[in-house]
Each structure stands twice: as C-alpha cells, then as structure tokens.
Amino acid sequence: MTYSTSRLTAVGSAIGLTYGSILIGGVTTFAAASIFGGLGIDLASRPSLRLLLNTLMLQGVTFGGVALLYLRIRNRDFDFVPFTIPDGRDFAVIVVGIFALLGLLLGTSVILSALGIKSAENQIVTVGEQNPAVFLLLIPLSFLLVGPGEELLFRGLVQGILRETLHPTRAIMLASALFASIHLFSLNGEGS
C-alpha cells in the first residue's frame, strides 16, 4: 500500500467511523425508543426522557462501543488510544482554554448581535428551557457518558487513525471538522 493510499484509507476510516457511529446510534436509539413505546411510554410527550435515552444510546453505548469494536477488529490494544492523567500544566491549559472560549463566545455574540444576525440554538437548550431539570441531568451525563464517549471515539480513535498518516495538525483539524459536522444536526431556529 502506498503512502497516499494509506492516507486515503485513514481518511475514509475516520469518515466511516464518524458517520457510521451516528447511523448505528440512530438505529440503537430507535430500537430503545421502540421498546419504550412497547411498554406504553410515549417519548414524544417526554422530551427529558427522550434526551436521556439519546444521550445514553448515542454517546454512552454507541460511541464507546464502536471505538472498542474497531480496536478489537483491527487487533489493536487500548494503548492505541492515548490516555494520561492531567498534570498541573494540563489543568492550566484547560482553565486558560475555557476562559479563551468564553471570551470568543462573548465576542462573537456581541458581533452577531450588532449585525442583527440570530444564531442557531442547540435543541438541548430548547428542551432545557421547557424543563430546567434537564440541565441538572445533563451535568452528570456530560461527565460520565458524553465526554468520555466522544473523546474516546473522536480524539482517541478517529484522530489516532488520522495521526498515523497525516501531520498532527492536519489530523487534529480533520478530526475536529468531523466532530463539528455531527453537531450541525442538533441546531435549530432562525440562525440554523
């Protein structure tokens, strides 16, 4: 296999893992929702329960499950997905990064508002506005399922596959673009 062919294979694998996971997650969530429906639980009238089910099935079960299955099929051990305990420097980067992102968000919001441009809203915000208790549920889910599932799949596996044949900066940018692309579907409103 030539270097350019292995690059195409890596990019194809990354794209396949990204959208394949979404597809498998959709099927898994539909199956779970069907079970709830069979038990007489109407998820359409219970957005909080629907959000919990989507989070559990997509980020918890599917993202982590697909990543582990891929590692097993490719005969790779868990060392392929780098994992370290954050040190003091890592925490400093996290804190600075959070404040930088908040500043960027604030600046972007001010500019968009001044230009009269309405931004899209995540569907979770809409559900949370109707039932604020959803936000309390999302806090532990974000730490226990969403973060680990997404990081394992995208930063661990997808970025790792790309890093084997692409420059690290390109691998990070492509993995980030794939990650961002799956979130476009959760936006709604005038700005979407």
Image (cartoon, rainbow, N blue to C red):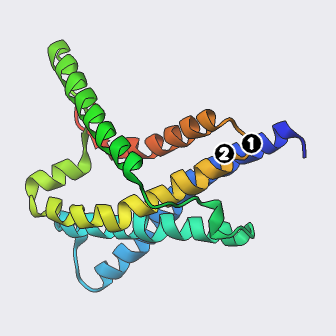
**Residue at x 45% of width, y 46% of height:** 182
- 146 left or right of 5? left
Give percent across and percent down for residue 41: 22, 79
- The residue singled out by tag 1 in the image is 165
- 8 left or right of 183? right
- 45 left or right of 39? left
- The residue singled out by tag 2 in the image is 162
Nearer to us in this view, 94 or 149:
94
| Farthest-out residue, top | 115
**Residue at x 21% of width, y 17% of height:** 111
Nearer to us in this view, 22 or 153:
153
Marks 2 & 1, CB-CB < 8 Å contact: yes
* Residue 72 in the image: above or below residue 120: below
Give percent across and percent down for residue 97: 33, 38
Q: Report the quarter where the C terminus lies.
A: top left
Residue 110 in which image quadrant: top left
- The amino acid at mark 2 is Leu
